[in-house]
Image (cartoon, rainbow, N blue to C red):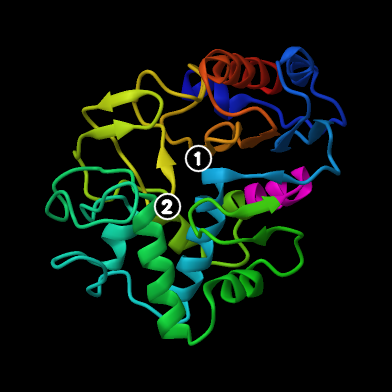
Amino acid sequence: MPEEIRSRSTPLVSPFVDALRQVDGWPCAHVAVGVCGAAEATRGDAELRFAWASVTKLATAVAMLVAAEEGVVDLDEPAGPPGATFRHLLAHAAGLPFEAGPPIARPGMHRIYSNYGFEVAAAFVETRAEMPFAEYFAHVWSGTGMVLHGSAGSGVEGTLADLLALARELQAPTRVASETLAEASSVQFPGLAGVLPGFGRQERNDWGLGLELRDGKAPHWTGSLNAPSTFGHFGRSGTFLWVDPAAGIALGCLTDLDFGDWAKDAWPRLADAVLQEVL
């Protein structure tokens, strides 16, 4: 969608966005979806707690950025495998494999999506902060109902309200400085190729600090109308959250059906329908 059209769009504050009806036809037993920003609307099981899977990384990244602002860690200090920094770990550029194991590439050479990298980063914060990472996470996210169990990369459980609290932080940050979020949502180690889980190899698999960047990726789990500046994450448990700064909205969804071909079709269609309606 052209930027001039986006800039002329009139904010819509509505208790209902018709496009959200699409989730009623999804093959899920339970689903909760919400829009926030220039439009505010929800649909589905808003009070049910869901496993977020890798959408967890968005909330964990915020906690780690708070740690950087508080001086607990420095983004550019050595961390993880030899030659890597804390920044490499958050940007999936440290050369670590998906699960625990030795490096499979030199830092900064490839974008290798790594749950293990987030575990290493969490352990680093835990040592420096002298408290369990889950406790540090809970401190950062106090006032919400999200809870981190186990993995710093995939262990959050929470409701749709919790997911939208995360979305609002990523739209108008209060826990971190806006400058920090701007850095986190910009490309780290530009030009790295790598595999986007579920969608195959991307020659420019751009990533921020814990935030996956839409840019020009194709195929992708967001919509064709999402701006290149869109960022977010999706989870294997059938969950996603994206923020489109150009449109001024975020869209988040929690389901109880694992990611699969159904999501590759349904999620982009929902994104485009929401953007068409809101803008």
Magenta extent: 158-168
User: Residue at 48% across / 59% down in the picture?
Assistant: 61
Q: Which residue is mark 1?
A: 233
Give the distance between the C-alpha atoms of the residues marked 1 and 2, in whole angstroms.
9 Å
At a point 21% along the width and 44% down the height, the residue shown is: 190
Q: Which residue is mark 2?
A: 210
| 212 is higher (above) or lower (below) than 156 | above
What x and y, as percent, mark residue 232?
A: 50, 41
Q: Is residue 147 left or right of residue 128?
A: right
- Quarter of the image for residue 266 reads top right
Crowding around mark 1 (Cα neighbors within 10 Å: few <14, some 14 to 19, many 20+) is: many
Q: Are marks 1 and 2 in contact (CB under 8 Å)?
A: yes
Secondary structure beneath dot 1 equals: strand
Q: Is residue 160 magenta?
A: yes
Residue 143 percent across, percent down from the top left: 76, 67
* Numbered mark located on residue 172 in the image: none
Residue type at the position of mark 2: Gly
Seen from the viewer's position, the closer of residues 228 and 59 is 59
What is the chief secondary structure element of the magenta stretch?
A: helix
Relative to the observer, which residue lies in front, 123 or 224? 123
Answer yes or no: is residue 71 visible.
no
Above or below, comparing residue 74 to residue 236 in the picture: below
Picture coordinates of residue 55 (x, y %)?
A: 55, 45
